[in-house]
Image (cartoon, rainbow, N blue to C red):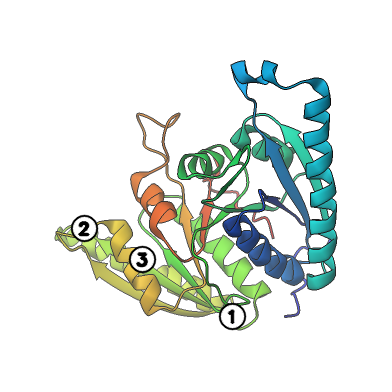
Amino acid sequence: MAKTTTKQSKKHRIVVPIDFSEQSVIALGQACGVAKVTGADIILVNVIEDLGMFEKYFSQKERQEIQKSIDDRLAKFAGDHSKEHGVTITFRVERGKIYDVINKIASDLNATMIIMGTSGTMGLMKFIGSNTLRVIREAKVPVISIKGKHHRKGCDNIVLPVDLTKETRQKVTYAIELAKFYRGAKIWVCSILTTDDEFIVNKLTRQLSHVKSLITGAGVKCEAEMIKQHEKKSIADLVLEFSKKADADLIMIMTQQETRFAEMFIGSSAQEMVNESEVPIMSIVPKEQPGIVETPF
């Protein structure tokens, strides 16, 4: 689809960790779709993990041979996918810890976002849940995590859970800008009602109505729904159920950190959705100054 004129002066770059596993290739396919809409370049990143005490068992020649083998495979892989999708794809091979390398490269390149598979292994590469969560936790840019294997092209429906936190405005702005790239995309807003307190209920109802007004006022289609929490279901469960109703292509969440353990965890609901959702999850780190909303698009 044609892109809008939003911030065309900025060169978009998408970092995609790749280990040639099925899930990382699926993530690349999704990244190519985003790149075609936003005019972004894609940078594939393959990380050879440090082997610690086992490193001494590999000679310099063996390490060079491993590096060359990966370089050759990536060059062909990038070239084939670039030709197939009509987007610019380059690659980098680095050594270190997966989450450190991915976030450093994204920062160095001033990347727009990171798109990565959440599972899969090959050789010395590992993309397991803990690595995905650590990339999300430490990233300075949005991270789209891809767990499901079957996805449509484009993005017709975006699910946006909102609450009463000050970061909601940031998330709404991101959703509106992304929806404008995908002309005709619809935003499905939901709020989870976790109390019967009349004051909170009324405040959340007003917030939901206000968010819908902001979105429709920006020329984007929107539906909004209040969902009452079920005693046997978590907030993440309810959002994922709502995403099925919305036939979602993407769920946008804020990685609100647990106050006392911010250095170790992202919010429990965010973790659950990243780990369980078959729909791609865009995780956005809240800005320190919520009054200044700068989207990556």
Q: Give x and y (percent) for residue 155.
A: 58, 75
Residue visible at 67% across and 29% down in the picture:
96
Q: How would you rate the neighbour count of disc 3 (Cα within 10 Å): few for under 14, some for 14-19, many for 20 or more?
A: many
Q: Secondary structure at mark 2?
A: loop
- Which residue occupies the foreground of this view, 192 or 101? 101
| Label 1 sits on residue | 219
| Label 2 sits on residue | 194
Q: Amino acid at mark 3?
A: Leu
Q: Amino acid at mark 1?
A: Gly
Disc 1 or 3, which lies upstream in sequence? 1
Residue visible at 78% across and 61% down in the picture:
40
Q: Give x and y (percent) for residue 73.
A: 80, 50
Gap between marks 1 and 2, in whole Å? 31 Å
Q: Nearer the viewer, mark 1 or mark 2?
A: 2
Q: Which mark is residue 61?
A: none
- On screen, residue 13 versus residue 135, left or right, reads right
Disc 1 or 2, which lies upstream in sequence? 2
Q: How would you rate the neighbour count of disc 2 (Cα within 10 Å): few for under 14, some for 14-19, many for 20 or more?
A: some
Q: Amino acid at mark 2?
A: Thr
| Label 3 sits on residue | 240
